[in-house]
Image: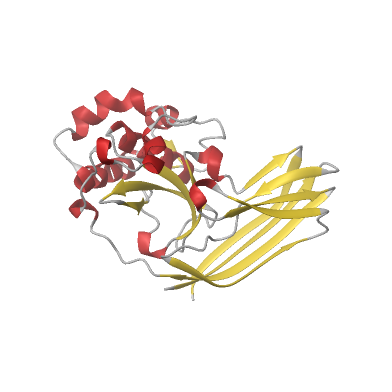
Amino acid sequence: MLLDVSARLDYEVDDPVSILLQIEAASLPDQRIIKARTDVAKAAHFARVPAEDGVGERSWIRVGGKFRCVYSAQVEIDRPAVDLPALSATPVHELPGEVVRHLLDSRFIPAEKFRQFVDAEFGQLRGGVRVAAMRDWIEANLDYVRGSSDAETTAVDTFVGRQGVCRDYAHLMICLARASQIPARMVSVYAPGVEPPDFHAVAEVWLDGAWRLVDATGMARAEEMARIGVGRDAADIAFMMVFGASELKEQVVKVVKA
């Protein structure tokens, strides 16, 4: 499958500021970048650095007054659909070292607090069956409400409030997985069919020896997503971090099947 993706960012910023940007689709075995272009207007400094877990790259940018960036790419997705309930969980003592940190609590995901809940609600289920049930529970029990959360909202807040946006759905999905001793991490993606169109956040869970994409909002399919970056939670996958003041003027994200 081919995806045409584009993102346009237009911000007023302090003079000058440093920006850590992560909006470019990653080159990975299951997704190939056919063509891509990134244009940043009047950047005094532009340098690429590796991103989390070796997935994709970030860019350090130094600009003043205005930040304008246009990114476009065509990405070939070669990721077959997976029968999630058929996948098995890896015993924790057999997990590879690089995966272990994704079992642990992080800034927005206090998974230890959910142990009692997941045992009571999903205790008889294992592996992919349990992950699928948790995904379905989140989709059924949360309402997608724009503006219902902010940059400080945690998985606990989302669980109590029963509403959020994709960031919050992903945090809660990861939280329930980690509480079930299944490694999980957060992923920023481009995906068609997301409403409203934007950078989308989903989860990845470690099942049958590999990372598996899971979208608890139900808007995106694993075989149609282009990964941008991964991390422990939203703090690691922000599409833009501005080290200074900024004001949004315009932001447009488009994803279509080619």
Query: Is residue 232 depicted above or below 3 in this figure?
Result: above
Viewer-closest of 61 and 147? 61
Left or right of 161, for residue 126: left
The foreground one among 42 and 159 is 42
Give the position of the N terminus as an image quadrant.
bottom left
Residue 9: x and y, percent? 69, 56
Residue drawn 55% across the image and 30% down it:
152
> How are the residues colored?
secondary structure
Q: How many marks?
A: 0
Counting from the top left corner in percent of width and height, residue 222 is at 36, 59
Left or right of 2, for residue 120: left
Residue 175: image x %, image y %?
Answer: 37, 34
Residue 13 image point, x, y percent: 79, 44
Q: Is residue 248 left or right of residue 140?
A: right
Say whether residue 75 is visible. Answer: yes
Instruction: From the viewer's perspective, tell me whether residue 165 is left or right of residue 250.
Output: left
Query: Residue drawn at (46%, 64%), measured in percent from left and top?
Result: 192
Residue 164 occupies quadrant: top left
Up-down: is 235 above or below 211?
A: above
Give the vertical position of 8 relative to 182 (above or below). Answer: below
Residue appearing at x 31%, y 31% in the figure: 179
Report if residue 221 is visible in the image: no
Q: Residue at x 67, y 46 (%)?
A: 20
